[in-house]
Image: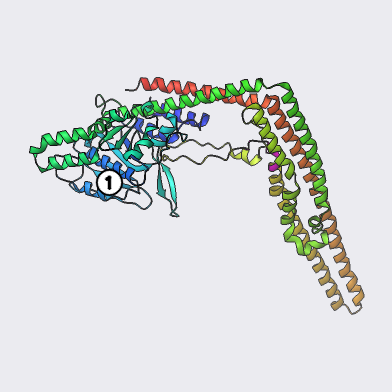
Amino acid sequence: MSVSNGAVVREELERKIPGLVNLSRLQLALQGLRQRPGQEAIRVAILGVSNGSSGVEAARKVLKALIVDPLVDEQEWEKKLDEHDTSKPLIVLVGPRQGKVTRLVTSKNLPDVLEVSSAELNGLNLELLLTNVEVPVNGSGMATVQALEDAVLAPAIEVASTDEHGAPLPAPVHQALLVADGLTGAVRIAGLPILDSGDAITAAVDLKGFSKEQLGANFTVIDTSLAEEAVKLFRQGPHNAMEYERRWSTSNLGMLVAWLKAGLKAADDETTKPAVRKLIASILQGAHSAIEAESTSHELARELSASISSPEMRAMNEMLSEWAQSAHAELQEQLDLAFSGRRWKKLGWWKLFWRVDDVAMLTNEILSQRFLPTSEQELVYLAGRIAQLQGQVGLYSQPISSRETGSGSSSSGFTENEPVIPTSPRSRLPKWPGHIAFTRRYIQNETVPALQSLAQQLVVQSLATSSVTSCLAALLYISSFSSTIFEAGAVAALGIVYSLGRMQKKWETARDFWEGEVREEGRKAIRAAEESAAGVLDGTQQDENTAQRIKELEDASELVAKAEDALARLK
């Protein structure tokens, strides 16, 4: 699988099945493919299972035991690791140090980074993540392998944002080691399908006095205190080698070291590391399982919809017809009350001089309280009845804004240097016909501002015309001794009457037009909502959307098959 092919696969999977593949894990796999085979950077998470503070403390001890070198005295990085605040995530970079200085890079907004040198792991390009993770207890819902992999192989770490509020940041890894402490931790681990996840996830419980065989568990029973004692004994002198070997073997930490190295070392230096292969295989298997699950659900829904008895369908169609009749009646009655009520009368033409700024507020109140509020609630209830009858939520046709269609043509491809941070998903469409709410928002956002602007223009024009004619009358009276005050007043009165009459005519015309537009848009919304619900009941809209989705799933399945074939040919 080349890098270019991998990028195409990622783009196609994101476009066709955005909710069925973990994009952060997919991007981590592509980063590995960009590196030279055998030299890929491998990320391994050491995750303390949340159980007070003991889980992450045990995880820190395990991490230290995995990379400690008993042949040398205690190193500086061991002290820094012991002093680390376990409430914050820590990234450990394993590699040859420049000189003998151990670097601990701290950051306010990012996880701390500790550079460590290990004689056995220096050349393997290893990165370790130490943090805690929330896993459910038995029967709390996370029973599938895919859900476990999404939670453990792409853990979310808290990172402080610019406003000093914590924000979860996905940190995808190739492998993960779950570490728990005591019997409580063992219970939390025992209910997880770890054995079904392959070698990418393993678990260990720091538990003294028990063995894996005694518990019949799906995790490794370890003793971190015994491992620490073994390392201290060996550092005291080589004469303790036998005792070191006995205690180290009894602690079972060697099994975890072997698991770690198995994913880091390939058969030769030019072969892709096993951890990268397993990550790609896991992503493809998860996508394949998700595609099969959704395809099966669509088939079952189609069979259930076909088996619905005709009396039930007729009753539902009658309910839809009754809803449409009551909605038209409500529209007429409520708008008659609104346009003959106190609020609408406040917007009389002669009241605009002191209520011109209240036009938007009063019209929005009319729309919020009188524009089909009851029918909208009944439509949601009716959509719920239809979903109960058909066994799934209907895919209703929705109104589309011209702004959305204009902006939807912009490309949204991934760039080469994009961080592994998923973007926020778009807001989902309602699970019922949204025509009434859409029409209400359209009137509020498009026609009400225009009505408000017209009112302001008419007031300004009326005042301007009245002022000009009044000034002209005053000039006539002052400049001519033959003009009487009555003649000058007649000129001023003519201008005022003309401006007010013009204002009255235009404003009343605009009010009548807006009133008619609200009524007509309401009727259109009712008809569109009725047609959308009828399409779902008849099965035409549902079948069309389902067929399109099944076609997308089939294309995605072929894409996954091509990726699996490319993985099989990968060096």
Secondary structure category for the residue under label 1: strand
The answer to whether 472 appears left or right of 145 in the picture is right
Residue 299, how many percent across, how many down?
58, 21
Q: Residues within 10 Å of mark 1 (few under 14, many from 20)?
A: many
Above or below, 471 against 356 in this view is below
By secondary structure, the bulk of the magenta-drawn segment is best described as loop
Label 1 sits on residue: 114
The residue sitting at 56% across, 24% down in the picture is 297
The residue sitting at 56% across, 23% down in the picture is 550
Relative to the observer, which residue lies in front, 558 or 246? Answer: 246
Extreme residue toward the left, this view: 239
The answer to whether 50 appears left or right of 95 in the picture is right
Residue type, mark 1 in image: Leu
Span of residues in magenta? 429-437
Residue 384, by quadrant, is top right
Q: Say if the magenta span includes residue 434.
A: yes
The residue sitting at 39% across, 21% down in the picture is 566
Q: Quadrant of the N terminus?
A: top left
